[in-house]
Image (tube, grey):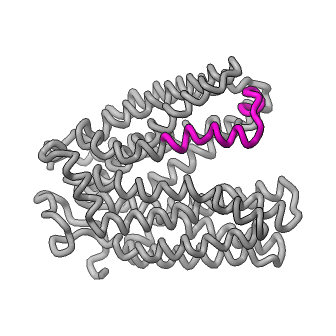
């Protein structure tokens, strides 16, 4: 492994944080303007939902390709290429919206979806490398940066809408900011070690799909991703439909969830360093379950708000811990992150329509109980998050891999 001095590592840590925040900004900077985009394109809600499949479908399809690409080009170049794909996609979305062209907007969303997937895998690989070299738990904080970027993007969208700035102008400006920021940010990423090119990337992809630990980490990410996504999509609606609350109260409830999740990611490193990944995951699963049960209890809005806090804290660490665990071995980090991510990202594709279908038949509050099964999947995969050791690794670990930051006593 290439030796890097401390100051270089600290710069790389900042760069990874910026990459996560910019990724969140790239999404949050236009998703909050979805109603305006739908209106400009002249689509119904159903039609707009089909258009968004261009984004989610491209994102899911590109995930398996991300590992080999990161393995070949390294995280810095991969993040740069991916961010430029997002920039092109944002420009296409803005142009399509201005012209009222659904095909053009859809093509833009495809570029965004592909870019977001590659960007996500590459920055997680780089973040895990920085975390490993510094010997500190950093992944939750990096993911908090994504949450902060998303919130910032939503805030920019709200301000732009209030000031009557067109969607096209806002999207073009967002694309320009992302392009400039990422061109400078990737220069601070760590040097690419030679181990990225030692074996055939294609062979390693096939091997990773046969590794029980990697598959279980994917199940872990799937469970916690579904738990997080269900609240993102349905918490505000559950307050309005299930409790007769106003839309403003629904937004407040969602805000409670996002705030708790962001704080959990900012301060969660202390729990991981004290108790280890597995115990932390199990504690957060209990918190998410308690919060979910309060939300669907039917008691009242104050109880739902308390539940939103517990749910947000419980959903905060599963995704970053899963990504960190998948990247334990630097030799195979990119491949394993892409395989585990391929499984985990299924939650974001299948979750919203599944809950929506159930809500049509039983109501939104009972439908949310399906999240209990997702939490169970997260618990099922939690044991796989134990740090790799020579005894439990499916392949020999990289010889120069530093010791894990995991507490030594955990099993």
The residue lying at 36 percent from left, 76 percent from top is 383
The residue lying at 61 percent from left, 65 percent from top is 312
Front position in the image: 108 or 287: 108
Tell me if residue 154 can be seen: no
Direction from residue 151 to residue 320 in the image, left or right: left
The residue lying at 55 percent from left, 36 percent from top is 26
Point out residue 34 in the picture as x, y percentages from the top left corner. Answer: 70, 37
**Quadrant where the image shows the C terminus:** bottom left
Front position in the image: 154 or 348: 348
- Is 204 magenta? The answer is no
Direction from residue 75 to residue 313 in the image, left or right: right
Q: Is residue 171 above or below residue 272?
A: above
Magenta stretch: dominant secondary structure: helix
The residue lying at 26 percent from left, 77 percent from top is 408
- Location of residue 166 by image quarter: top right
Point out residue 308 in the picture as x, y percentages from the top left corner. Answer: 69, 67
- Is 50 magenta? The answer is yes
Q: Which residues are magenta?
A: 36-58
Point out residue 213 in the picture as x, y percentages from the top left corner. Answer: 30, 69
């Amino acid at each position: 492994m290439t030796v890097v001095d401390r100051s270089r590592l600290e710069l790389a840590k900042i760069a990874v944080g910026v990459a996560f925040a910019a990724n969140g900004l790239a999404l949050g900077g236009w998703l909050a303007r979805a109603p305006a985009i739908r209106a400009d394109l002249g689509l119904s809600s159903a039609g707009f939902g089909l258009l968004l499949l261009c984004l989610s479908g491209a994102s899911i399809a590109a995930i398996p390709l991300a590992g080999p690409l990161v393995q070949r080009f390294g995280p810095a170049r991969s993040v740069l290429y991916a961010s430029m794909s997002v920039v092109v996609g944002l420009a296409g979305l803005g142009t399509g919206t201005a012209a009222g062209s659904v095909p053009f907007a859809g093509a833009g969303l495809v570029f965004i979806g592909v870019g977001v997937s590659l960007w996500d895998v590459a920055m997680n690989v780089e973040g895990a490398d920085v975390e490993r070299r510094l010997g500190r738990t950093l992944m939750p904080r990096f993911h908090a940066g994504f949450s902060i970027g998303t919130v910032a993007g939503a805030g920019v969208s709200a301000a732009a809408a209030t000031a009557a700035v067109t969607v096209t102008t806002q999207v073009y400006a967002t694309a320009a900011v992302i392009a400039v920021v990422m061109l400078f940010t990737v220069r601070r990423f760590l040097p690419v070690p030679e181990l990225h090119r030692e074996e055939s990337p294609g062979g390693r992809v096939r091997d990773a799909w046969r590794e029980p630990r990697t598959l279980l980490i994917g199940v872990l990410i799937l469970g916690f991703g579904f738990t997080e996504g269900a609240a993102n999509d349905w918490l505000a609606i559950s307050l309005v439909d299930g409790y007769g609350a106003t839309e403003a109260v629904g937004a407040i409830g969602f805000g409670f969830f996002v705030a708790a999740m962001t704080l959990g990611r900012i301060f969660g490193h202390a729990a991981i360093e004290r108790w280890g990944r597995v115990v932390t995951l199990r504690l957060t699963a209990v918190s998410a379950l308690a919060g979910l049960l309060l939300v669907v209890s039917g008691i009242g809005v104050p109880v739902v708000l308390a539940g939103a806090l517990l749910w947000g804290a419980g959903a905060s660490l599963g995704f970053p811990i899963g990504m960190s665990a998948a990247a334990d071995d630097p030799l195979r980090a990119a491949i394993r992150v892409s395989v585990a991510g391929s499984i985990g990202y299924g939650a974001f594709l299948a979750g919203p329509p599944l809950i929506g279908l159930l809500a049509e038949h039983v109501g939104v509050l009972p439908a949310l109980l399906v999240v209990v099964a997702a939490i169970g999947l997260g618990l099922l995969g939690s044991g796989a998050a134990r740090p790799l050791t020579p005894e439990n690794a499916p392949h020999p670990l990289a010889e120069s891999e530093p010791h894990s930051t995991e507490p030594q006593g955990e099993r």
